[in-house]
Amino acid sequence: MVFLKEAVWEKRLRLIFIFLIITVIALAFLWRFKKIDNQRENKINSPQVAVVHESEGENDHPYVAVYKFTDGKHIVALYQIIREQDFLFKTVAAAELRNSPEEIASDSAEIGVWVKISGKWHFFDESLAETDRSEQTKTKVEGVNFTTKAQEKETIILIVNDNHEYRLGLSDKVRAVFSLSSVENLWLAVTESDFLILHK
């Protein structure tokens, strides 16, 4: 039996080749984990919104509940939208949650917000104090159907059954649009990083 002696340069070449393969595999794993972390962070940083009261007239202001991850804290806030003050978001109450909610929802009878944390629903009243309440009053307000068109530095939103274009001076992807009034064209658009009013 003949054993071929490996030359020094062949051994070095083989070791370099093995090192390169291990490096490529390590970089691929690192890239994948970073991508997953970024997706998780984007999900946490994206606002969650529930319209908890839809306006039924000029003097009846809509209310929205918003969850946002801010300064390392999970914050849920309840806002009243004041029409006559250029659609000012007036803070009614704010509270810190122990974890990021999986979902938020409105209540069919009360101004307040349902928050789902670790698979369990909790109700927070108008002052955002946690209160015992039957889950049967929980209701999910669905967004309206819409399409978007991206242009150079703006996004155009077209809402089904509304003959008006709403132009946003941003490139953020619009995730949802909710009705804020049952009697007029007043909407809340939720983007990947913020939320804003749409009106004629």
Image (tube, grey):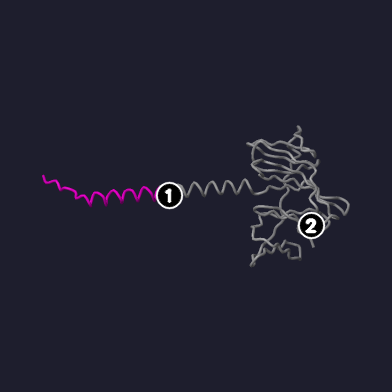
* Residue 198: in magenta span: no
Question: The disc labelled 1 sits on which kind of residue?
Answer: Leu
Residue under the image location 67 percent in, 39 percent down: 116
Q: Quadrant of the N terminus?
A: top left
* Rendering coords of residue 136 (x, y %): 74, 38
Q: Which residue is mark 2?
A: 186
Q: Position of residue 84 (x, y in %)?
A: 86, 55
Establish if 128 lies above or below 90.
above
Q: Name the residue: 79% across, 57% down.
A: 186
* Image vertical order of residue 157 relative to residue 106, above or below: below
Q: Residue furthest right?
A: 59
Indicate which label's residue lies in the foreground, 1 or 2. Answer: 1
Identify the image quadrant of residue 75. Answer: top right
Q: Is residue 152 left or right of residue 184?
A: left
Residue most toward the bottom?
Answer: 152
**Left or right of residue 88, residue 16 in this image:** left
Left or right: 51 in relation to 193: right
The Cα atoms of the two marked residues, 1 and 2, are separated by: 48 Å
Furthest-top residue in view? 132
Residue 137, given in percent of the width and then of the height, sits at 76, 39
Quadrant position of residue 170: bottom right
Indicate the position of residue 124 as horizontal and vertical percent values: 75, 37
Element type where label 1 sits in the image: helix
Asked whether 16 falls inside the magenta stretch, the response is yes
Q: Neighbour class for label 1 at 10 Å: few (<14), some, many (≥20)?
A: few
93 and 189: which is toward the camera: 93
> Which residue does the numbered mark 1 point to in the structure image?
27
Q: Which residues are magenta?
A: 1-25
Q: Residue at x 73, y 63 (%)?
A: 166
Q: Quadrant of the C terminus?
A: bottom right
Sequence-first disc among 1 and 2: 1
- The type of residue carrying mark 2 is Leu
